[in-house]
Amino acid sequence: MRKAISYVTVAGMLFFLFAVAGALPQLYDPNSPAARHVSPRYIEKSHEEIGSANYVTAVLADYRGYDTLGETTVIFTAGVVTVMLLRTGLKRKKL
Amino acid sequence: MNRDFGSIVLDTAFRYLVPFILVYGVYVLLHGEESPGGGFQAGALFGIAIIIARLVQGEKCELNIPGNAAVVLGGLGTFIFGFIGLLCIFFGGNFLEYGVLSFLPEPQRHTLGILGIEIGVTICVMATIITIYDALTRREVSL
Amino acid sequence: MSKEFLSQYLLYWLIAVLFMIGPIGMIFKNNLMKKLMAMNIMQVAVIIFFLALGQKMDATLPIEIPGLTGVTNYINPLPHALMLTAIVVSLSTTGVALALLLLIQKKYGVLEEDEVLRRMDQ
């Protein structure tokens, strides 16, 4: 029974992903919705506002610097969690 | 102890490979505004260089950052990032608004601010990669 | 094999197949390590999907070339910035997951899911 539900769920997800491909935006289209909203501002104004030739760096570190701060915190937290997981087990054994 | 790891082939390849990886990491970090690159990639390169040293020469290798120091360095990198953001508030702007940092020369304020936070990101990513590798390969883990 | 089929349906279908390796592996595989690998493949599919959405016809990399201006000459820099951070986060989540798997291996001796569940009940 559980196997049957798994097969039906996976088949349904695959069919849904295939069926929805026609409604997604045309690839390589300069006027697709993803290319019209905020990215023209980044490309046009980045040179005078930031002065950086690499637009990805300008977006990453200046326009969305707050996101990158959260990102760095997540990475640091992951490192600390790894150390805590593997070293506290060591101490519990020695007690 | 010296012969637990490595052979003549590995040692020679290590000696020729690692300086280029380190120089390429510095290039990717400093040219992040002009060419493809940035803090995350440079941190990954530095971390890989030290992991290669650990793999070839073992725990006692010369190019090394110990696991405990790596945790502290990760915190230091995150602190550099947040400190530059708070410095902008101290000079009267918003968080991470580099244009108000008046001790920097006028046209390069944004670029130097981006370079500062990318140095922080580099240290954090490098230290985290070393931390994860060190914790996963530590010998005496037992539960 | 029209141009529309190649540039619209085929790429999305390939990404969908790559994405579905993740849920299929996570549901049907028994080994926890293989489940983690399936999750990483799913992450790669999402990254490729975002990068494909950022492309433009006849455009170059999002790095400014002197003298070349105009929005349509550069591809969208926003998906690149987002996915750059997603890759690094996937590295750290993989590290934490490997640490957890190491602890499970140390405590129960195996990584097979049903065997771990059986030994957990004892």
Image (cartoon, rainbow, N blue to C red):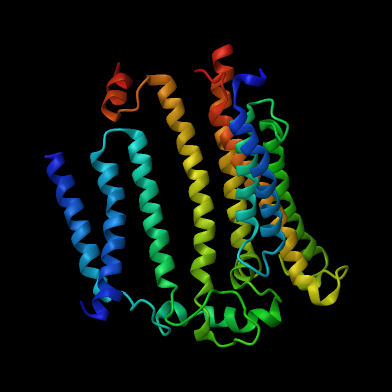
Q: Name above or below for residue A7 compared with residue A84.
A: below
- Residue C18: x and y in percent read 30, 56
Specify whether A14 is left or right of C58: left
Left or right: B4 in relation to B30: left
- Extreme-top residue of the structure: A95
* Viewer-closest of C36 and B101: C36
Residue C72 at x, y = what percent? 49, 85
Q: How many marks?
A: 0
Q: In front here: A28 or B87?
A: A28
- Residue lying at the far right in this picture: please name it: B103
- Can you say which quadrant of the picture contains the C terminus of chain A? top right
Q: Quadrant of residue C68?
A: bottom right
Identify the image quadrant of residue C122: top left
Taking the image as drawn, is residue B93 in sight? no
- Judge by depth and name the residue closer to the eye, C120 or C59: C59
Q: Is residue B88 above or below residue B19?
A: below
Image coordinates for residue C87, horizontal then vertical, percent: 50, 54
Who's the residue at 64% across and 53% down the image?
Answer: B42
Image quadrant in which you'd find residue B7: top right
Residue C64 point in image, percent of width and height: 62, 78
Query: Which quadrant of the figure contains the N terminus of chain A?
Result: top left
Tell me the residue at 54%/20% (across/down): B141
Left of C41 or right of it: where is C61? right
- Give the residue drawn at x 82%, y 69%: B101
Q: Is residue B1 above or below residue B17?
A: above
- Residue A58 appears in view: yes
Q: Nearer the viewer, residue A47 or B34?
A: B34
